[in-house]
Image (cartoon, helix red, strand yellow):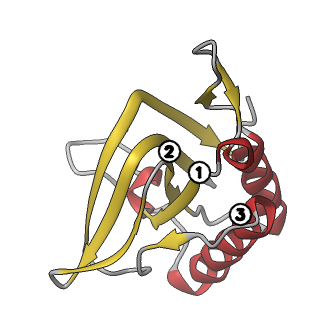
């Protein structure tokens, strides 16, 4: 399971020319589910993100988590995070999970992050064509992969 976290001042997702959801200060999480991912990956990644200290304290140091700042989370499904560009010029998405596997794990991830942050999680719609807008605060952008837990 791959996630690209972006600390944001605000973020929104538009579907069919209508704002579907939006948040103020917090994290935008672009989430890609891989064929080999499991509930264990969901647990690890959701926990790590909920506890991640990406927000500045009074000294300007990144020492605060979402819970400590009252920040919100928006999760957007993005299978393209599993693109392979090894051969040719057209990316392959063969490692991305099919919807029948990806949707339950995506929904479980949203539920776990909501439970861990004690706040509702904004999201897009799995499989929809979406326009995502954000103001990256910092900029702070973090890459995480549950198959490569560094």
Q: Quadrant of residue 72?
A: bottom right
Q: Position of residue 86 (x, y in %)?
A: 37, 38
Distance, label 3 to label 1, CA atoms, is 12 Å
Q: Position of residue 78 (x, y in %)?
A: 42, 62
What crowding class fits label 1: few (fewer than 14 Cα within 10 Å), some (14-19), or many (20 or more)?
Answer: some
Relative vertical location of residue 101 with respect to residue 110 in this rendering, above or below: below
Q: Quadrant of the N terminus?
A: bottom right
**Which residue does the numbered mark 1 point to in the structure image?**
71
**SS of the residue at dot 2?**
strand
Distance, label 2 to label 1, CA atoms, is 17 Å
**SS of the residue at dot 3?**
helix
Q: Any mark on residue 4, and which?
A: 2
**Direction from residue 30 to residue 57 in the image, left or right:** right
**Which residue does the numbered mark 3 point to in the structure image?**
113
**SS of the residue at dot 1?**
loop
Q: Quadrant of the C terminus?
A: top right
In front: 111, or 61? Answer: 61
Q: Quadrant of residue 108?
A: bottom right
Relative vertical location of residue 144 with respect to residue 12 in this rendering, above or below: above
Q: Residue at the location (70% across, 32% down)? A: 64
Kindly tell me whether residue 150 is visible in this rendering. Answer: yes
Q: Position of residue 57 (x, y in %)?
A: 65, 23
Distance, label 3 to label 2, CA atoms, is 15 Å
Kindly tell me whether residue 93 is visible in this rendering. Answer: no
**Direction from residue 34 to residue 13 in the image, left or right:** left
Q: Any mark on residue 30, and which?
A: none
Nearer the observer: mark 3 or 1; the answer is 1
């Amino acid at each position: 399971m791959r996630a690209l976290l972006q600390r944001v001042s605000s973020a929104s997702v538009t579907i069919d020319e209508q704002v579907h959801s939006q948040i103020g200060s917090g994290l935008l999480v672009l989430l890609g589910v891989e064929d080999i991912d499991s509930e264990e990956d969901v647990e690890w990644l959701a926990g790590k993100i909920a506890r991640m200290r990406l927000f500045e304290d009074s000294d300007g140091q990144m020492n605060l988590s979402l819970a400590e700042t009252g920040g919100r989370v928006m999760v957007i499904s993005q299978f393209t995070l599993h693109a392979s560009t090894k051969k040719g010029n057209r990316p392959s998405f063969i490692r991305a999970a099919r919807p029948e596997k990806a949707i339950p794990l995506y929904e479980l991830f949203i539920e776990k992050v909501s439970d861990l942050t004690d706040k509702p999680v904004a999201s897009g719609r799995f499989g929809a064509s979406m326009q995502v807008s954000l103001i990256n605060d910092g900029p702070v952008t973090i890459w995480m992969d549950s198959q490569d837990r560094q």
